[in-house]
């Protein structure tokens, strides 16, 4: 009985163990299934990551054989997946010392570029050169991480790489443009100045000379306008080549800006040796330039020279001195060269002083306007007036406009001064209208530099509207020389201003180097004959003929004519006889203050003054020297 009971008990216990085993097995099955699903999800995510990454991924064994690759790796190496698997990774690596194609193959076969046995757990390599399966080289950044099994043994590596060829090319491009001129391939101003500074530092004992030549192409703007920018660019490239061929290997040629070049001559025995180079440049530059299209083009250059000496000039001062010498060369007829002289330094210092003073002139109220009447010979009345700026610095003698206006243009201050003039004149016209009941139109001189953007036109419109003036109330005068500095932009802005109803005149006509064909296309209303021709009336038949021709030409173009510098009765009678429309000069009136001009306008309006009687009635009338009486903004 006991035996039977024990048997039954053992049987029950065995069945319980079977039930427990089945339950455990079921639990293990569920755990395994869940792990499998999580592994599939993880693998799927890993696969998406590999396929979407921008980097190439390669799996390697200990021999460097590729065991795995993602799609990006195939794209970068330009090879199919099936062909890539089983390839040696060194097939795609180009050793740095491979000098030729044959050397490259030998190096790849005999040298382990990537030594997996010595590879750190993680390694990042400097950018190197690889090649695609087709042999196309490219630059890569790459890193590698060793793969390790459970026993701690290395089984291979995973290599990640990225093609940075375009990035490197962009970086090199940026670096190139920071130091070189794109059009000519010469060094740019920044590069040139840096090298010059180094050369001056090395020349500490001053036993040898360094010479700087600043070279400016004569009348390049006119050439560019008549023949087109493409031809102009080709001329600059050809001139750059000629300059490079004229200097020694140790010298340097640069393009500073536009059509201005610079040459640094180093290690000269004598300062005057720079003149030898300048003479060669003048000769070479004057030789006709043969272009791909059209007839050969001839030009010339002006050159300014500055040489290191006992005064220890720094690089900026040396370049500035050469530029000052260039201005003298251009003033002496161009196609020549000039050395910097001490008196030029004095002028440069005075220019800098005036430039500094100009910064506070408007805020200090140092400018004021004067007005010179312009007389209509047909109506025998005041037709308009020209506004002339004057400067009386607080702690210095008055400075003439022909001194401070060019400095303001060069330093970029002309915009603020021009705005002040425009605002002052507009306000004065409004004041005369309110007091006299008429709108006397006033002409102001505008620098061509003010017309190099749309800002002047927009400010002009705003001021005219603010003072509620007719658009023709303020006339604009430009010198022909100024117009030709940047004819394309100037033409565009003048057309837009003229379309608004603004009257436009060319001042000092006949004194500049201009294209009559271009002037014909300008939206002009008035041509002003320069006073230098007026002074020749009664003394020079040549000048008289020029005045007659200019009056006829202007009328043929539908333009009115103003003759400046009328100072004698003989001048007036000649101009009347040849149908000049308007005259301006000391014969009628010098430039007047606002109060005196107001009195003159009032007297004419009241009928108490005939302007043709001004020469006899003006008490301040005196003999006027034959010289420019004013220079205006």
Image (cartoon, rainbow, N blue to C red):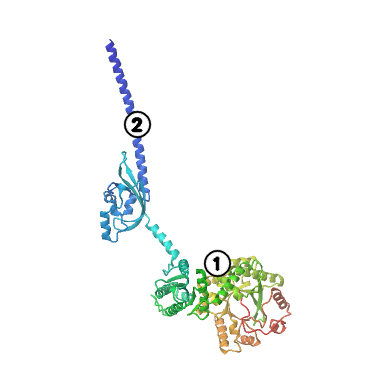
Which of pointers 2 and 1 lies earlier in the amino acid sequence?
A: 2
Which residue is rendered at x = 36% and y = 45% of the image?
A: 48
Q: Position of residue 582 (x, y in %)?
A: 62, 81
Query: For residue 363, what is the image quadrant?
Result: bottom right
Q: Nearer the observer, disc 2 or disc 1? A: 2
Which residue is rendered at x = 61% and y = 77% of the image?
A: 631
Under tag 2, what secondary structure?
helix
Q: Position of residue 379 (x, y in %)?
A: 66, 81
Which residue occupies the extreme top position in the image? 1
In the image, taking residue 482 as reference, residue 242 lies left or right, namely left
Q: Is residue 21 visible?
A: yes
Q: Nearer the viewer, residue 506 or 3?
A: 3
Residue at the disc numbered 1? 454
Question: Distance from label 2 to label 1 (Cα)?
Answer: 78 Å
Q: Nearer the viewer, residue 369 or 164?
A: 164
Mark 1: give few (<14), some (14-19) or many (20+) Cα within 10 Å: some
Q: Are marks 2 and 1 in contact (CB under 8 Å)?
A: no
Q: Is residue 59 visible?
A: no
Which residue is rendered at x = 65% and y = 76% of the image?
A: 384
Q: Position of residue 565 (x, y in %)?
A: 62, 82
Q: Is residue 606 above or below residue 70?
A: below
Q: Nearer the viewer, residue 451 or 379?
A: 451
In the image, taking residue 223 as reference, residue 53 lies left or right, namely left
Q: Nearer the viewer, residue 597 or 626?
A: 626
Under tag 1, what secondary structure?
loop
Q: Position of residue 461 (x, y in %)?
A: 60, 67
Residue at the disc numbered 2? 30
């Amino acid at each position: 009985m006991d035996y039977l009971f024990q048997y039954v008990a053992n049987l029950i216990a065995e069945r319980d163990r079977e039930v427990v085993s089945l339950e455990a097995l079921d639990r293990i099955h569920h755990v395994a299934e869940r792990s499998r699903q999580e592994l599939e999800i993880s693998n799927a995510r890993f696969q998406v990551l590999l396929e979407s990454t921008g980097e190439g991924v390669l799996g390697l064994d200990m021999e460097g054989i590729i065991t795995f690759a993602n799609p990006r790796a195939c794209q970068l190496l330009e090879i199919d997946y099936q062909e890539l698997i089983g390839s040696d990774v060194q097939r795609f690596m180009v050793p740095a010392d491979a000098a030729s194609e044959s050397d490259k193959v030998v190096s790849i076969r005999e040298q382990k570029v990537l030594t997996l046995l010595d590879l750190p757990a993680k390694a990042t390599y400097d950018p190197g050169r690889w090649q695609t399966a087709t042999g196309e080289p490219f630059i890569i950044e790459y890193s590698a991480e060793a793969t390790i099994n459970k026993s701690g043994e290395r089984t291979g590596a995973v290599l990640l790489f990225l093609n940075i060829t375009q990035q490197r090319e962009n970086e090199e491009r940026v670096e190139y443009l920071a130091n070189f001129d794109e059009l000519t391939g010469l060094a740019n101003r920044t590069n040139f100045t840096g090298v010059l500074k180094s050369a001056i530092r090395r020349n500490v004992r001053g036993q040898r000379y360094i010479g700087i030549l600043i070279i400016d192409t004569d009348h390049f703007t006119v050439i560019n306008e008549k023949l087109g920018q493409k031809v102009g660019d080709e001329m600059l490239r050809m001139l750059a080549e000629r300059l490079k061929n004229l200097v020694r290997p140790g010298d340097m040629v640069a393009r500073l800006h536009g059509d201005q070049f610079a040459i640094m001559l180093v290690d000269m025995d004598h300062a005057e040796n720079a003149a030898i180079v300048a003479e060669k440049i003048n000769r070479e530059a004057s030789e006709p330039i043969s272009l791909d299209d059209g007839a050969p083009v001839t030009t010339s250059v002006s050159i300014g020279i500055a040489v290191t000496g006992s005064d220890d000039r720094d690089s900026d001062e040396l370049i500035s001195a050469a530029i000052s010498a260039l201005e003298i060369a251009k003033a002496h007829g161009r196609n020549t060269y000039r050395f910097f002289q001490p008196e030029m330094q004095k002028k440069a210092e005075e220019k800098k002083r005036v430039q500094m003073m100009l910064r506070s002139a408007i805020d200090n109220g140092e400018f004021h306007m004067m007005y010179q009447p312009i007389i209509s010979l047909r109506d025998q009345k005041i037709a308009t007036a020209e506004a002339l700026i004057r400067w009386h610095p607080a702690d210095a003698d008055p400075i003439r406009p022909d001194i401070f206006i060019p400095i303001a243009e060069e330093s970029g201050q002309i915009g603020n001064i021009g705005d002040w003039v425009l605002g002052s004149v507009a306000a004065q016209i409004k004041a005369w209208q309110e007091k006299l009941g008429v709108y006397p139109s006033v002409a102001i001189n505008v620098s061509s530099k003010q017309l190099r953007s749309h800002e002047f036109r927009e400010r002009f419109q705003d001021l005219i509207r603010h003072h509620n003036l007719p658009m023709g109330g303020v006339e604009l005068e430009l010198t022909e020389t100024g117009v030709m500095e940047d004819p394309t932009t100037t033409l565009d802005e003048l057309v837009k201003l003229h379309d608004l109803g603004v009257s436009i005149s060319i001042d000092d006509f006949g004194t500049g180097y201009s294209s009559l064909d271009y002037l014909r296309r300008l939206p002009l209303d008035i041509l002003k004959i320069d006073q230098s021709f007026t002074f020749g009336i009664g003394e020079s038949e040549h000048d008289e003929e020029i005045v007659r021709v200019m009056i006829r030409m202007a009328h043929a173009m539908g333009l009115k004519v103003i003759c400046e510098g009328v100072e004698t009765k003989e001048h007036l009678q000649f101009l009347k006889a040849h149908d000049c429309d308007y005259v301006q000069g000391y014969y009628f009136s010098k430039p007047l203050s606002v109060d005196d001009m107001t009195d003159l306008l009032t007297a004419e309006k009241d009928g108490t003054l005939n302007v043709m009687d001004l020469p006899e009635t003006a008490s301040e009338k005196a003999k006027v020297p034959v010289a420019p009486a004013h220079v205006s903004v």
